[in-house]
Image (cartoon, helix red, strand yellow):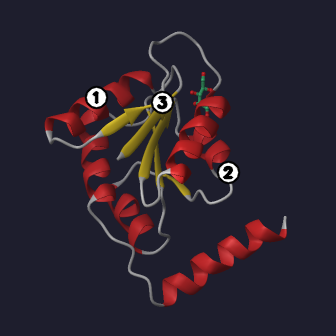
Amino acid sequence: MVYLGADHGGFLLKEAIKAHLEEQGIAVTDCGTYSEESVDYPLIAKETCQRILADEGSLGILCCGTGIGISMSANKVKGIRAACCSDYFSAKYTRLHNNANVLCMGGRVIGPGAACELVDVFLNTEFEGGRHQRRVDQITAIENEQ
Ligand code: RB5
């Protein structure tokens, strides 16, 4: 399952990603928002991330205007490693090296064609583990110290 969430700034991008995934037969859960009416991205991030964590091994895609506010919010949820990306290399390596479980993008930054390419590589790349596991464990340790 892929969980999708967006504020009004990322709504159209989320809709394009949703259609792209559904065309491939990938199951998605749309956690909102459902229009271009203004909403607060931290609330969407929290709701979407809680649903991701409740479904072990699942991944999420979050969009706002820049991808930044919604990624900051997502990273406040314990267990979430959200990466704000607008290039293919970062979207791939944040899975390989950071074991990111959420990809964030900006609807005012990246077009739907490029965004869908980032989504595809993000969803189809596995964490490498090895030395990267130690570093991800250190991220978790920082989180647990707070
Ligand atoms: C909303 O106008 C905008 O601030 C939001 O979508 C996002 O870009 C925040 O980081």
Are there few (<14), some (14-19), or many (20+) residues within 10 Å of tag 2?
some
Disc 3 residue type? Cys
Q: Earlier in the sequence, mark 1 or mark 3?
A: 1
Q: Tell me the quarter of the picture where residue 25 sits.
A: top left
Which of the numbered marks, if any, corresponds to residue 16? Answer: 1
Which of the numbered marks, if any, corresponds to residue 77? Answer: 2
Direction bottom: furthest residue = 131
Q: Tell me the quarter of the picture where residue 44 sits.
A: top right
Are there few (<14), some (14-19), or many (20+) residues within 10 Å of tag 1?
some
Which of the numbered marks, if any, corresponds to residue 31? Answer: 3
Mark 2 → mark 1, Cα distance in angstroms: 26 Å
Q: Nearer the viewer, mark 1 or mark 3?
A: 3
Compared with 107, 39 (above or below) is: above
Which of the numbered marks, if any, corresponds to residue 144? Answer: none
* Location of residue 29 in the rendering, given as x and y in whole percent from the top left corner: 38, 35
Residue drawn at (46%, 27%), measured in percent from left and top? 10
Compared with 115, 10 (above or below) is: above
